[in-house]
Image: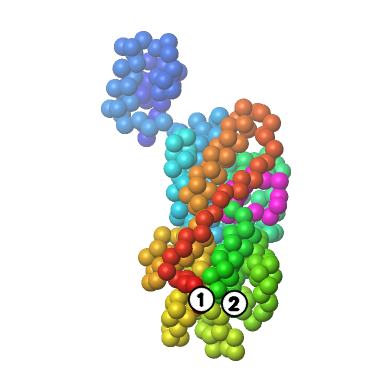
Amino acid sequence: MTTLKKVAEYAGVSTSTVSRVIAGKPYVKEETRQRVLKAVQELSYSPNILAKSLKVGRTNTIALMVPSIQNQMFPIVTRGVEDTARKHGYTVILCNTDENIEVEKEYIRKLQNRWIDGFIVCSMLPDSDHIRKLKADGFPVVLTSRYYGDSIDAVIIDNYRAAYEAVSYLIITGHKKIAIALGRRQLSLYQQRLEGYLDALKDHGLPIDERLIMNETNGTNSFYELTQKLLDGPVIPDAIFATSDPKAIVVVRAIKDRGFRIPEDISVLGIDNIEMSAFMEPPLTTVSQPLYEMGALAAKKLIDLIDHKNKSEEPPAPVVDVLETELIIRKSTARRK
């Protein structure tokens, strides 16, 4: 392996001169600089960037923790993080936690000790106290997608408002029996979306029927069986509000396989606006989250926190940025007569 010392011997200079040339520092004669650069090229020398980074206390690397990259919202968030990180000279390490808190802890344990400058966390669970400890220890952390009211920087949407407006739209367009395909209640975003659903029904004078609330049992695909069971029951909904687009996709398949038409018999509305939602048959009405912007802003906030830490400055007070959502009306919903 070519070392700094070998390059210096090859170029006939000291190791400190080679270091200055590689670092782009001044006070090196041009003739000497060219000789060193030629030696670097001919010997195929690659500086040990990691060792240098550890010496100065940063690696220009951040970790992005997601529940699963198979969830179609997270590739868009990831792209926003990566594009912003790259512009600022950072590399992103992607970590899939699979909703497993022990996996989350293991990633943090392996990456925290000067290998990573900060974490963007999309996978936080209510009992993710190890993430709260990162923040308490002064380690740069930004949350996105999930947030539990902690004093940690975050980029989120107003999940309550998004659900409230979606269900209100269904009611205003004549739907009376609106079911909900609800994700795990332990996650704050789904609890908030449930509250938006319930309050929309109450505020428009519609009764709450527990038989129309489908609770996730075993991942998103469980809504296929749950929807078919609902359609076989005594109360047939005229609309189903799915608390994510992947859930809506499963609900649509279950409705069609039971012989119902969308939207003639049952309207379906989701949340996310993932790319596939526009290409379904029929195209899905959904609440659009600014997923790319969430990732981009989370990365920018994290890099700012890292810069404050590197300058030994007191970090600013945590800020929770709440981004706007938009109802995208397509053909999976229709006005009831």
Residue 67 location (% of width, % of height)? 54, 59
Residues under labels 1 and 2: Cα distance?
Answer: 9 Å
Name the residue located 31 percent from the left edge and 17 percent from the top edge. 34
The magenta segment is 143-156
Q: How is the image coloured?
A: rainbow
Name the residue located 39 percent from the left edge and 12 percent from the top edge. 28
Residue 261 location (% of width, % of height)? 43, 81
- Of pointers 1 and 2, the one earlier in the residue sequence: 2
Dot 2: element: loop
Q: Disc 1, disc 2: CB below 8 Å? A: yes
Q: Residue 336 bears which disc, if any?
A: 1
- Is 146 in the magenta? yes
Q: Is residue 145 left or right of residue 29?
A: right
- Asked whether 32 or 217 is in front, the reply is 217
Residue neighbourhood size for the residue with mark 1, other residues' Cα within 10 Å, grouped as few (<14), some (14–19), many (≥20): some
> Label 2 sits on what residue type?
Lys
Residue 318 location (% of width, % of height)? 67, 41
- Residue 271 in view of the camera: yes
Q: Which residue is mark 2?
A: 176
> Label 1 sits on what residue type?
Arg
Name the residue located 30 percent from the left edge and 27 percent from the top edge. 41
